[in-house]
Amino acid sequence: MPPDENTKGRQKMKLLKLKEVLEITACGKTKLYAMIKEEEFPRPYKIGSASRWRLDEVENWIKTRPVS
């Protein structure tokens, strides 16, 4: 299906569930939420009662981490 005028030039935004974020980042749930509280990790988007993270924001966070 060709893009219409409303979506032309925009990519689809992939949203991740908590389980996926934990797998990608190799962080535990407690550590992840502590980093969010300290503004060291992107805040989730609330969709109803569900929390979702944008894949591009998580990938950007990973790219900016220091290599140890």
Image: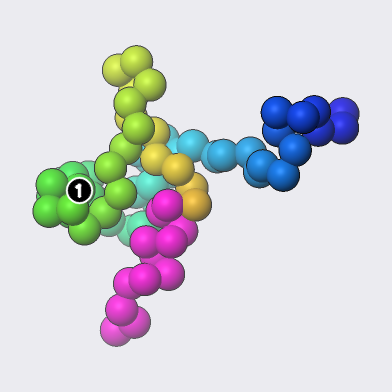
Q: How many marks?
A: 1
Left or right: where 48 falls relative to 10: left
- In the rendered image, the residue lying farthest to the top is 48
Q: Is residue 17 visible?
A: yes
Q: Which residue is mark 1?
A: 36
**Local secondary structure at mark 1:** helix
Whether residue 28 is situated above or below residue 44 in the rendered picture? below
Counting from the top left corner in percent of width and height, residue 10 is at 67, 42
User: How is colour applied across the structure in the image?
Assistant: rainbow
Q: Residue at x 42, y 52 (%)?
A: 57
Whether residue 5 is situated above or below residue 57 in the rendered picture? above
Left or right: where 35 falls relative to 63: left
Query: Which of 13/67 is in front?
Result: 13
Counting from the top left corner in percent of width and height, residue 51 is at 33, 30
Counting from the top left corner in percent of width and height, residue 9 is at 72, 44
Res 18 → quadrant? top left
Q: Is residue 31 visible?
A: no
- In the rendered image, the residue lying farthest to the bottom is 68
Q: Residue at x 39, y 40 (%)?
A: 53
Left or right: where 51 falls relative to 56: left
Counting from the top left corner in percent of width and height, residue 43 is at 28, 42
Quadrant of the drawing holding the C terminus: bottom left
Where does the magenta region start and end?
57-68
Left or right: where 35 falls relative to 23: left
Whether residue 60 is situated above or below residue 57 in the rendered picture? below
Query: Which of 18/38 is in front?
Result: 38
